Amino acid sequence: MAGSSIPELVSALGREEFPRSRLAEELSRQGYCRVSDRIALLANQGVVRRITRDWFVLGTLWRKRNLHLRWLANQLLLPSTLSLEYALGFYGLIPEATGTFTSVTPRRGRGFETSEGSFLYTAIPSRAFPCGRTLASLGEERFFLASPEKALADKVWTERLPTPVDWEVYLVEDLRLDEGFWSSARMEELRRFAAAYGSRKLSSLASFFEKWRGGRPRGR
């Protein structure tokens, strides 16, 4: 490399996941004029791996840690928050952990199929987006994740459900939501999200939980 070794480049990048602009900036600083050609060469050598048009990760042999894919999910489409099936699985509220990083965004929805996983973004109203957005951590990784109640609200809002909704059938048979959550879910949060969405469907869900907690026969 012109005045620099690959290890020095890797060190200068500062992390395993980075935007193309950061890679191009570092290569320019090291004296390369044909940055796109150099990036293509680094990719062919396995030093970097393209995730999307604008994002790269280090190749496997050059990583000092596992990729922070949850953090990356937040970055691929700004702004966005991990939610829906991924968040419900993260909290252990549904039995299957999805292999797709599902997120919500106030922007147009889209998806990315990459070598490191699938990233799916679902559009929701901008007024509902900031609600229930929390900063979570897993080891050294930090990422934005919907609260349990917001993840459920996002899931219900995006579903096409019959009217009226048989909530017990949906929650037990379709979603297979952990029953412990029926008692622990914060009703004031569900009501707040229903108002943010302007959703009668979510208001109906909150009413169902309240009636269930009040001792309504479950009729199974």
Image (cartoon, grey):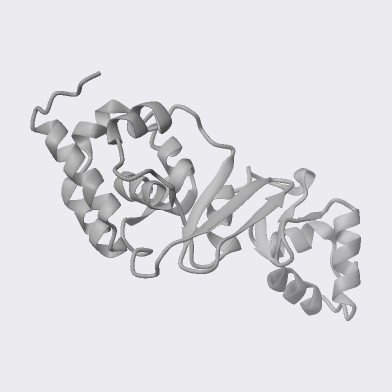
Residue 28 lies, with reference to residue 59, above or below; the image says below
Residue at horizontal 83 percent and vertical 59 percent from the top: 6
100 or 64: nearer the eye? 100
26 or 21: nearer the eye? 21
110 or 43: nearer the eye? 110
Pinpoint residue 146: horizontal percent, then vertical percent.
Answer: 38, 51
46 or 198: nearer the eye? 198
Residue 178 lies, with reference to residue 54, above or below; the image says above
Pinpoint residue 57: horizontal percent, then vertical percent.
Answer: 71, 55
* Left or right for 127, reference 98: left
Pinpoint residue 164: horizontal percent, then vertical percent.
Answer: 29, 43
* Left or right for 81, reference 15: left
Q: Is residue 138 visible?
A: no
* Left or right for 27, reference 127: right
Residue at horizontal 33 percent and vertical 51 percent from the top: 150
In the picture, which quadrant includes the N terminus?
bottom right
In the picture, which quadrant includes the C terminus?
top left
Residue lying furthest top: 220
Residue at horizontal 22 percent and vertical 58 percent from the top: 192
Residue at horizontal 37 percent and vertical 47 percent from the top: 156
